[in-house]
Image (cartoon, rainbow, N blue to C red):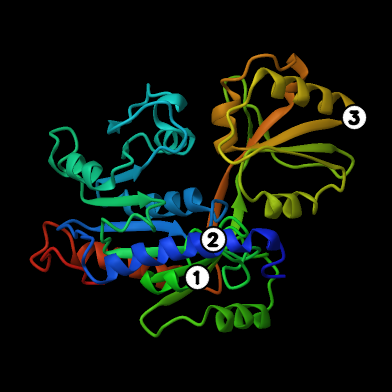
Amino acid sequence: MEGDLVRINEWLRPLSWLYGFGVGVRNALFDMGILPSRSYNIPIINVGNLTVGGTGKTPHTEYLVRLLSHRYRVAVLSRGYKRKTKGYILATMESSVRDIGDEPWQMKQKFPDIYVAVDGNRRRGIEHLCNDKATRDVDVILLDDAYQHRYVNPGVNILLVDYHRMITDDCLLPAGRLREPKEGKRRANIVIVTKCPHDIKPMGFRVVQRALDLKPYQKLFFSTLRYGTMHQVFGNGKTQLTEIGSNESVMLLTGIASPEQMRIDISRHTERITLLPFPDHHYFSDADAQAINQKFEQMPSPRRIITTEKDAARLKLLNGLTPEVRESMYELPIEVEIMREQTENFNDNITGYVLKNSRNSILAKGQNNF
């Protein structure tokens, strides 16, 4: 059911009130124009959330890349969370995970023809993308995880809400997982409820819709996860796994904020699942390698390890895994699918905005025409 993973640490609520006061003052300063928010004369689409991680920003950003890149020169701008560098970096195929972060690295490897850049200062990153000789032909910029970065006013703000962690049931950090009060949802042009079960009933959609209580100007969509063919993490990537047998033992090895839907989906194939979760964006250590080896050895055969593409990027840097573990480890590609036969409607909203606000369009006036 929706909101079934929300956990509130009641004893931390006083700290959440203090945190909420600070966030509220900051948002009020932006709302009153005291803190400046800048618009640009290029289509900018932000994909973000109100919670700490786990809503599916990367696969939704990749969805937009697939939708737009056949017609426009697309750039993805991220802060490059947990990278070991600072400032603005334009990714190349030779960039490492440590240089740009796991998600930008994954994006560049999957879509080598788009621009992928990292910069914690989104304004500076946008200026580089629009003005640097290497990237100034960019047509549309996708901001990854910039919903709270209000110094930039995107043309379209897409808010992602995890079906299993509804913002209406959650509370502010540190008692809950909200980065800002749920009223912040009003800044969204589009709200997508993500990670929905494939078999969600019409009543389930209506319950979520009523709970979110969106404004008339906001469009609501629902998405679910769709999995591609698994590939071996180590090796040439050509060894594939097309199905999981019911007699197989599976270790679900993840360093993501919310792996629950993956566990549910894998459990449809086998009940012999061993969870080995790590924190979001976790850089694996030698001690972690030993823990993985030991846990794998304890599993009955036949056995294999399944991880995410994002985790695979960091696991490839890890030494100390046994040959059997390396041979048995597969990454599971994740894509999103818009539900309720609303794919064309969603796509038209995005492509229509980009077309109207293109720098080559006579309609482009440096403002939000969404």
Rounded to the nearest whole Å, what is the CA distance between mark 3 and mark 1? 46 Å
Amino acid carrying mark 2 in the image: Leu
In terms of depth relative to the viewer, which is nearer, 138 or 274?
274
**Residue 125 occupies which quadrant of the picture?**
top left
Q: Residue at x 78, y 31 (%)?
A: 304
Q: Is residue 317 left or right of residue 266?
A: left
Circle 3 SS class? loop
Circle 2 is placed at which residue position?
178
Q: Are marks 3 and 2 in contact (CB under 8 Å)?
A: no
Mark sitting on residue 182: 1
Q: Position of residue 349 (x, y in %)?
A: 34, 70
Which of the 4 image quadrants contains residue 328? top right
Mark 1: few, some, or many residues within 10 Å (few <14, many ≥20)?
Answer: some
State left or right for residue 31 relative to residue 211: left
Question: Which one is earlier in the sequence, the residue at label 3 or at label 2?
Answer: 2
Residue 362 in picture, x, y percent from top left: 7, 66
Front residue (pair 237, 26): 26
Res 322 quadrant in image: top right
Against 164, is 54 above or below?
A: above
Q: Amino acid at mark 1?
A: Lys
**Quadrant assignment for the C terminus:** bottom left
Tell me the CA gap for discs 1 and 2: 8 Å
Mark 3 to mark 2 CA distance (whole Å):
41 Å
